Image: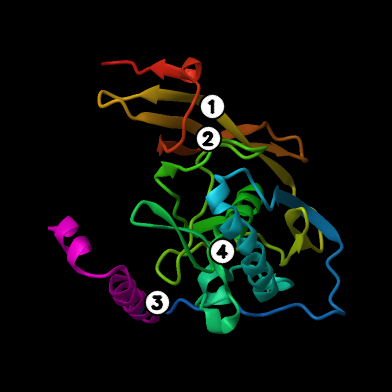
Amino acid sequence: MRKVVRNLVPHSLRAELRRGLRRIQDTQRRIRPTRRFASRSDVYPIRLFEHSSRLLKAVPDHLMPLQRNKVRNLELGCASMDRLLLAPGEVFSFCALVGRTSPRRGFVDGLEMHDGKMVGAPGGGLCQLANLLFWMALHLDLEILERHRHGLDLFPDDGRTVPFGMGATVFYNYRDLRFRNSLSQPLLLRVRVDPPRLWGAFYSNRRLPFQVEVVEQMHRFYRDDQGAVWRENSVAKRFTYSDGRAARIEQLAQNQGRVCYEIDEGKIETRDVA
């Protein structure tokens, strides 16, 4: 029945229905993400964590114009949240800050996934910014309230520095990235497009008593009984403490996704059968 509805109801109408439902849910739950920004006189001198990712990655030639367009979308996304101030207990919402990605607001067609297909759509490519924010939030051990990821491995690794499965896909407003500042100190967010990379960092007024390392385990490619190639791994957070406490490991995720590109047969394992 769900597949029949998807085929009969246009994607745009389904999206608007889900957006309306999400607004009702947020009102009922009294969710009020922060929109407070630091002034130029506010000083947060300690950089807690930073990360960057390459803006243009290897994609098929016919997709490169959409890949270049996403840079403009990322500039607008960064402008909507740069210098955001997140006090203890406050909630960050990607969709609340960026808003609807319409051409009227300057967003252009970038790569976006609809119904399992890569297409051009206004605001496409903003997931790269969500990916960066999610990765930084993990390293500060912030409370992740909402996060979605693609069930597909869309493109081959191209200078990847983050484990497979650590993305955060967003689509206004019902696929959001939300996290809470669960620390006892304020956080200042800085993000910008700094060609050839997208850059972000969290700052504060004092250092954290711990460090987080996100580690990948048991990574592999395998082929299922129908011949499709899949990728899977396990990801954990390793905590180390400045006060001498013993390090600890916290399991984070088990990831799996169907591979959508050609891969060397030598990298594909035979899946174990129970």
User: Which residue type does callout 1 highlight?
Assistant: Gln
Which structural element holds mark 3? Answer: helix
Q: Position of residue 105 (x, y in %)?
A: 58, 82
Is residue 41 or residue 151 the one in the foreground?
Answer: 151
Q: Which residues are magenta?
A: 1-27
The mark that comes first in sequence, 4 or 2, is: 4
Residue drawn 51% across and 54% down? 168
Which structural element holds mark 1? Answer: strand
Q: Which residue, given by chain and number where applicable, does mark 1 sit on?
A: 217
Q: Which residue, given by chain and number where applicable, does mark 4 sit on?
A: 180
Q: Position of residue 200 (x, y in %)?
A: 73, 58
Work out how far the residue at label 4 is from the one at label 2, CA to CA, in angstroms. Answer: 21 Å
Residue drawn 53% across and 51% down? 62
Work out how far the residue at label 4 is from the one at label 3, CA to CA, in angstroms. Answer: 15 Å
Q: Which mark is residue 235?
A: 2
The mark that comes first in sequence, 4 or 1, is: 4
Q: Which residue, given by chain and number where applicable, does mark 3 sit on?
A: 26
Work out how far the residue at label 1 is from the one at label 3, CA to CA, in angstroms. Answer: 36 Å
Which structural element holds mark 2? Answer: strand
Q: Residues within 10 Å of mark 1 (few under 14, many from 20)?
A: few
Q: Quadrant of residue 180?
A: bottom right
Does 69 sit above or below residue 28?
above
Helix, strand or loop: magenta stretch:
helix
User: Which residue type does callout 2 highlight?
Assistant: Val
